[in-house]
Image (spheres, rainbow, N blue to C red):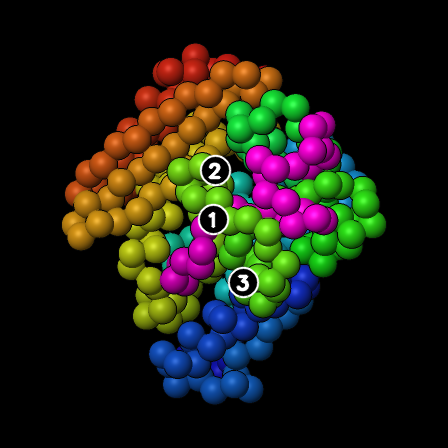
Amino acid sequence: MKSKIIIGSRGSKLALIYAQKAKDKIIQNTKFNDDEVIIKEIKTKGDQVQDVRLSEVGGKGLFSTNIEKELQEKKIDIAVHALKDLPALETDGLRIDTFLERNDPREILISNNKKKLKELKFNSIIGTSSYRREFQIKKIRNDFQCKLIRGNVDTRIRKLNDGLYDAIILSCAGMKSLKVEDKITEIFSTQELIPSAGQGIIALQCCKNDNEIISILDKINHKETSLRAQAERNVLKVLEGDCETAIGVHAIIEEDTIILEAELFSLDGLKRFYEKRSSKIKNAKELGIEVGEVLKKKSNNSYKR
């Protein structure tokens, strides 16, 4: 039996908040105490490369590869990730089956003059690093000029305040976790801007053969969030989604039914393919596969290079 548990995390303020949440859950649900659950900060290439799109330097894996390597080398027991930052296809030998209760999945706008999206001046410059967000807001108003923005939440807000952008779009979950909701100008519904698959979900990863850690993680898994994550991620898996795939996916659960809504854009953002379906919650994984296959067929692979 392990005498301590080591949790691996990125070193950003937000990532460490997520890691602390995981640590607290483990302590609440096991015999381990505060000193026996250790958070280890791990540098990732995604944090170091800040001036280009992720798709140009290796994709979403830049945020997870170094952490996964430490898992494989048994230097850590558990890896903590923001689910939306993980590649669609899972790494051999590793398991992502544990999810903490979902935070707010919605998107938010911050603008310098507190104007909402539709009130912004003509040709406003909007900061985003996501093709999905870019195409979604251009669907609302096609005069917007989208400009790349990278960095943590504090860095992005500073760039906005410096006048480099008229507004920026971020995830609500990050703002709430950092307790900076007072800076939010506008919150979009998940129908207005369908979020990224897994947005607002903290995923915990371990080795497939580490039965002791798996039994601990099973105790802290949030069942409803897990079903939503499985459905959303399976859409991505079918589409083999990466950083260039402009896709929004969001699932909700009402009683014993899961409702899955997704939109996919062509590479140039000019065509939008939409699908909404539901099934019993026991078929969450299958629903994700079904929606992914429908979108793939509708798009005729126009979302891929």
Q: Residue at x 38, y 25 (%)?
A: 274
Query: In x, y percent, where is residue 50?
Result: 77, 45
Tag on residue 272?
none
Relative to residue 120, is residue 204 drawn left or right?
A: left
**Dominant secondary structure (helix, strand or loop) of the stretch shown in magenta:** loop
Secondary structure type for disc 1:
loop
Q: Residue at x 50, y 65 (%)?
A: 78
Q: Mark 2 sits on what residue?
A: 193
Q: Are marks 2 and 1 in contact (CB under 8 Å)?
A: yes
Residue furthest to the right = 162
Q: Is residue 119 magenta?
A: yes
Find the magenta span and give its range. Answer: 99-126
Q: Is residue 262 above or below residue 30?
A: above
* Number of other residues with Cα within 10 Å of mark 1, as a class: few under 14, some 14 to 19, many 20 or more: many
Which image quadrant for residue 15? bottom right
Which image quadrant for residue 232? top left
- Residue type at the position of mark 2: Leu
Depth check: give the residue in front, 199 or 229. Answer: 199
Query: In x, y percent, where is residue 272?
Result: 46, 20
Q: Mark 1 sits on what residue?
A: 106
Secondary structure type for disc 2:
loop
